[in-house]
Amino acid sequence: MKKPTLTIERLKQAYLYMPETGEFLRLQETNSFGGKAKVGSVAGARNANGYLRIGIDRKLYWAHRLAWFYMTGEWPKRDIDHIDLDKSNNRWSNLREATKSQNQANTQKRSDNTSGFKGVCKTASGTWQAVIWVKKQKLCLGTFPTAQEAFAVYQTAAEEYFGKYHRKS
């Protein structure tokens, strides 16, 4: 990931980050998309995936990455994970640096999941299989007579591989 050229001084000149709310407030009046944004107004626009983007000097930045930069003085070296899964909740207490695998571990079950359990799918023979992805590699954890048993095995493996990043449901 290429390091942005934005400096911490320029960021703090343009915006005030509120760690308790996760909002960025404008410190300068700006012209954007044909209108004026007033000093003190909340910055950011949500994209189609729910993440907030903020413009500085005609360049867009992810708000969660700006929050990290604002608070630490350094650009994040890895992904920034939203602990509560709300992609627009950029409160400092809701953000943590994570590897791609850790970030993926903190997700809900897929929308096309038919077992009702994350990491569990039904096999052609009617048994239930526990599966986990670690560093882009699919690990089959075994097959079980019930989805609940498969899920218990998945939960144990997820805790082992991902620790605090593992979403339990």
Image (cartoon, grey):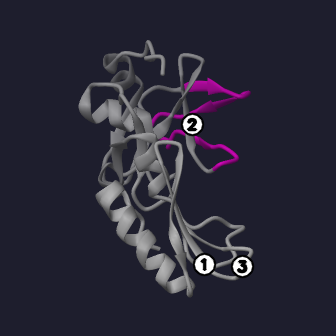
Q: CA distance from mark 3 to mark 1?
A: 9 Å
Callout 3: SS: loop
Residue under label 2, please give it.
53
Read off the magenta span. 30-49
Amino acid at dot 1:
Trp
Does residue 50 sit above or below 63 in this rendering? below
The single residue placed furthest to the front in the displayed view is 125
Up-down relation of residue 42 to residue 86 (above or below): above
Q: Is residue 33 above or below residue 42?
A: above
Residue depth check, mark 3 versus mark 1: number of the one nearer the observer = 3
Q: Which mark is residue 128?
A: 1
Q: Secondary structure at mark 1?
A: strand
Residue 42 is covered by the magenta coloring: yes
Give the class, few, some or many, for how many residues have Cα within 10 Å of label 1's Cα (few <14, many ≥20).
many
Residue 50 image point, x, y percent: 61, 51
Marks 3/2: CA–CA distance? 47 Å
Per the picture, the main secondary structure of the magenta-coloured stretch is loop
Q: Closer to the camera, 83 or 105?
A: 105
